[in-house]
Amino acid sequence: MHTVIDKLTWRYATKKFDATKTVSDEKLERIIEAIRLTPTSSGLQPFELLVISNPAIRAKIQAVAWNQAQITEASHLLVFAAWDDITKDRVDMMFDLTNEVRGFKNEGWENYRRQLLDIVAARGTEGNYQAAARQAYIGLGVALTAAAFEEVDATPMEGFDPEAVDEILDLKSKNLRSVIILPIGYRASEGDWLVNLKKVRRSRSNFVTEIK
Amino acid sequence: MHTVIDKLTWRYATKKFDATKTVSDEKLERIIEAIRLTPTSSGLQPFELLVISNPAIRAKIQAVAWNQAQITEASHLLVFAAWDDITKDRVDMMFDLTNEVRGFKNEGWENYRRQLLDIVAARGTEGNYQAAARQAYIGLGVALTAAAFEEVDATPMEGFDPEAVDEILDLKSKNLRSVIILPIGYRASEGDWLVNLKKVRRSRSNFVTEIK
């Protein structure tokens, strides 16, 4: 049980969490760090992560998310929130950080910054948000894998009212928009209708085309 | 070097591949299998994977992708192609497959099928394509992690003309649209400007908010 395939086979969209079990700080930090290390387009990291243990806040989110019990019964709720726009300030923040971390300014990199600034200016707010939201899903793929390596269960959810969640978490003031929520914790020993059902995926031949 | 964090720290967006090195079938199959196992919204798997080793096809793609040399110099090119729409037929295909694999029909699941069919009918073609494309990015996150566990380098690319790639790969006839391309292979021992530069990520405090 040490390969990515084993871990992805083990995991499933947990329907019933054990509300008495908490993910340790050590495991939580490793999952967070994996998400932070997620590669993104042009290195922009155009999303942020909210890690919510607060029960009252989670109850409010549950109420605008089809009342899905995992939101409050899991150990923590992760919220992936994408930039609502890719502004000049945000691009500059990441390019300046890159220069600072690497300790030098490079003409090729500065040309690329200008090129990217032209692209995001032309694409407009909604197009930039959509591009940012896609990057958050790379983070989700990494998060699900990282959680499985920690033997932590995780249930990705798109079924919630994003504007209501933005309101609850005051994301608008941070120029963020909620994209995915992910309860993490431990499966309950009873009461999960999905846990013993077979995982369903299309066959390799219906999913993969090789061009040799 | 066995944790997800180690693997994500090791990987980088390889700028110069060693064109003489080929990813073994065994490693390639494990990366493909990880992508196939990627969890997706409602279990739809609304994307497919093309695995291209053919040099002439890759040269054509390179020509419509800012001439990025990794496309032809890497061992293989993976193309993530999302469904151009989430049609009734496609939803039914996955729900029927689920019933077949699990060996029974379940009223709750059938209710959910009807609910989902209403959602995708209301959302329309472009909205459904955008939703499908996001799911492909979960696959990308898993692919990057799985490749790193195989010590295979990978360079995600959005910088290509999707309509031209769709044309080259005849994706329109399969009702697919190219979303991300991912050359995989082995970094060259020389000539990669990025390999020795520090990885840049926002600090934990600029990326994570905890609500306790």
Image: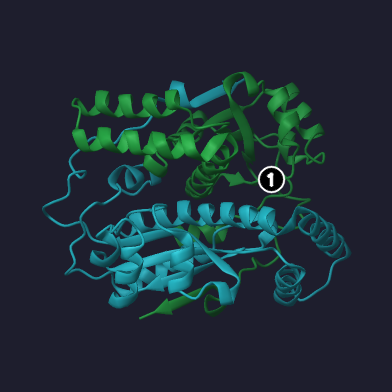
Chain colours: A cyan, B green
Which of the two residues, A119 or B115, is positioned nearer the viewer here? Answer: B115
Label 1: how many Cα within 10 Å (few below 14, some 14–19, many 20+):
some
Residue A117 falls left or right of residue A166: right
Is any atom of residue B2 visible in this view?
no
Q: Position of residue A112 (x, y in %)?
A: 82, 59
Nearer to the camera, A139 or B86: B86
Quadrant location of residue A56? bottom left
Towards the viewer: B149 or B138: B138
- Image quarter where the C terminus of chain A lies is top right
- Report the residue at 71% width, 49% height from top: B189
- Give amino acid for label 1: Glu
Q: Is residue A54 left or right of residue A80?
A: left
Question: Which chain is disc 1 placed on?
Answer: B
Can see residue B36? yes
Mark 1 lies on residue: B158
| Residue A98 rendering spot, x and y as whole percentages | 72, 70
Instruction: Say what secondary structure mark 1 lies in.
Output: loop
In this view, the residue farthest toward the left is: A190
Please determine whether, in this image, residue B37 is positioned above or below residue A172.
above
Q: How many marks?
A: 1
